[in-house]
Amino acid sequence: MAKRSFSMLEILLIFLLVMMTAITVSLLTLLFVTSGTIENNKDSGNHGFSTTQHTAVSQSSTATQAFSTTPEPPLLQNFSGYHIGVGRADCTGQVSDINLMGFGKAGQNAQGLLTRLYSRAVIMAEPNGSNPVVFVSIEIGMVSQRLRLEVLSRLKSKYGSLYRRDNVILSGTHTHSGPAGFFQYTLFVLASEGFSNRTFEYMVSGIMKSIDIAHQNMKPGKIFINKGDVTGVQINRSPTSYLLNPWSERARYSSNTEREMVVLKMVDLNRTELGLISWFAIHPVSMNNTNHLVNSDNVGYAAYLFEQEKNRGYLPGQGPFVAAFASSALGDVSPNILGPQCIDTGESCDNANSSCPIGGPMMCMAKGPGHDMLDSTQIIGQTMYQRAKELYDSASQEVTGPVASVHQWVNMTDVTVWLNSTHTAKTCKPALGYSFAAGTIDGVSGLNFTQGKTETDPFWESLRDQLLGKPSYEIKECHKPKPVLLHTGEITRPHPWHPDIVDVQMITLGSLAIAAVPGELTTMSGRRLREGIQAEFASYGMKDMTVAISGLCNVYTHYITTYEEYQAQRYEAASTIYGPHTLSAYIQLFRALAKAIATDTVANMSSGPEPPVFKQLIPPLIPNIVDRAPIGRNFGDVLEPLRPQYRVGEVAEVTFVGANPKNSAENQTHETFLTVEKYEDPTAAWHVMYNDASWETRFYWHKGLLGQSNATIEWHIPETAHPGIYRIRYFGHHRKQELLKPAVILSFEGTSSAFEVVTT
């Protein structure tokens, strides 16, 4: 056998892995020497930038009001429809000193803000106010188990048994440009570079506030449903895997992506518009892994456009109408519709390994339709918004019928799957394959791994065995043909690396079923699950059920491919952590939920094994340090001023003496990092025209040395801007600490000089 030679990249990786091991051991030693827990470090639960809505919950009522286990009798009960409430609240979290969650790329940390992230809640109940169900779409990468358990705990404390694990669905939009740090399982904690209690609290509080607002806004109304195809925004990023599904099955569909969008339109009895929920299968990865600005990506832009259309006169994030663009079966669906191309030559690399002749997989990247990723985000989002608006405006089929909900916790490592009447198979303990480390055409990992790998590599095997121990024979056999790279289900230090206990959940409103899936279904997986649920309902007389697949719900478990797609071991299959029969297990479990609802036997279902809550999680690797202004300067001073005049279409840019934006995630002094204000002569006052939730603004934070930093604000002046006198303001917080005293966080402001905007 020839002697193995190592490339410079592999030598560097070995060095980095050794260093990471040393750092991890040091951190764990420090962690377990100290006796503090996450609970000991929790703040009051209040965070900055709480965006006010048209109908808001007052601070006093939020803090002190006790709610009974059942809602107060509604004013109107004798009507056909539902009680409906909608709410929206900021859940952005940190926009600095934290990794962005989704691509898993080292060094892709937050360095500012493009748009705020929002939690959007919809509560729907029977006409008499009974049987409420809550659907929350959250602009984050995914919902972690720790996040859901904390929200359920706080809901129980505030509302008693009104909102529970069975009737509350939390779904992530799957933006890859939101902050990480809100997980409890070790693999995700390591990917996040620690657990950020600051961001965790911010998200939990935002989710709670959106539900509180929806609860307060409950009123009689009607729900209408519509469905239609969206074209020109998707490609299948693993088409060779899709082709492994049976031809007879594929022949029933016109596309290798699911193009159907499901839209719910909600109005009150006076036909006043309340909001919408849209489910559509698309990865929010128009913003690629070179991005460093927190934002909600393409689905967030669609929600932004819809809410701006319906909430005229309000700033982004404000106004009564709520538009939730939720995730669906997006596992193999990319918005980068120009397809994978070799970066150096422009040639297609749409092959089974997503690899280029020169440079291999690291040179193969998919491109969106725009001239850059921001432009692509807006093009894809605009198309989704426009189609959703058409479906919303033409929605005429009313949703009627009883409300029901069902939930189970399931040990996904030990599900017996009936393949037919005589043969069974089992799910596996979690494990990730080699192709997981390759990434996808939407964001390659930068490591020397290739998609479609079905054999192990002696080098990586040896390195893994020395650092993490050897995977068992049982886990390797169970996952075949996946070559196991990380046997996460057998690694338990400092805590388990992946969940064993997962949520399966469903809510129904008449002929609509919402299936809350704890992962990313591929296109064909989503179709099979939908058909399985529909067939189960039909077998008990509930025909013509519409099944909305809601993805990234309640706990994150990576991907769910079909058995046939699993054989190819591309990224999605390598990330199907419970083995080749994962989809079959979920279909079986969700059919059981459907049967329980159809036969009115929900009360007889076992709740299942409750998931754990871990304490003493690895803290963030980046410490909190004191902010410092340059000598002779103050926080908020202008360093690089604006010009006296700009034309529409130009970019007004100003730089201030800044402080770390993560400080602003700990208080409520300001609602925004920036405002663009216009001077109005009649009132002799400045009026806010744009904030940091506006897509026309950018907030960049530039980290310097020894606590010094700058903040740059850009306003991309739109064609719709009115001529006149403007100014830009900056709002921040700096950390100050005196000798032998605890640190304090102090607010500050900065204001640019006035400038004129003229038309072209």
Image (cartoon, rainbow, N blue to C red):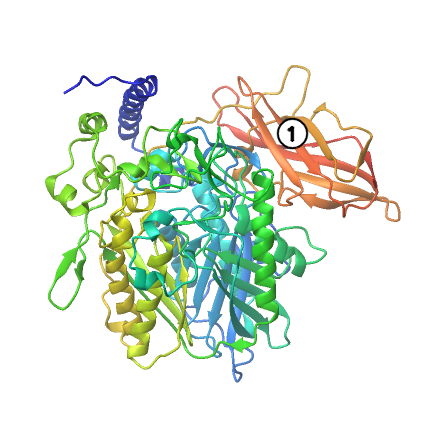
Image coordinates of residue 294 in percent, x first then y, are 53, 39
Residue 96 showing in the rendered view: yes
Residue 617 showing in the rendered view: no
Q: Is residue 342 above or below residue 508?
A: above
Q: Quadrant of residue 165?
A: bottom left
Q: Is residue 427 above or below residue 357?
A: below
Image-based side of 576 in relation to 109, left or right: left
Image-based side of 72 in relation to 21, left or right: right
Image coordinates of residue 372 in percent, x first then y, are 58, 37
Q: Residue placed at 15% from the left, 33% from the top?
A: 470
Number of callouts in the render?
Answer: 1
Q: Is residue 555 above or below residue 8?
A: below
Q: Residues within 10 Å of mark 1 (few under 14, many from 20)?
A: many
Q: Residue placed at 65% from the left, 45% from the top?
A: 694
The amino acid on which the numbered mark 1 sits, given as a three-letter code, is Thr
Q: Residue furthest bottom?
A: 78
**Of 569 and 653, which appears nearest the observer?**
569
Give the residue at mark 1.
712
**Of 406 and 685, which appears nearest the observer?**
406
- Element type where label 1 sits in the image: strand
Quadrant location, the C terminus: top right
Image coordinates of residue 77 in percent, x first then y, are 52, 81
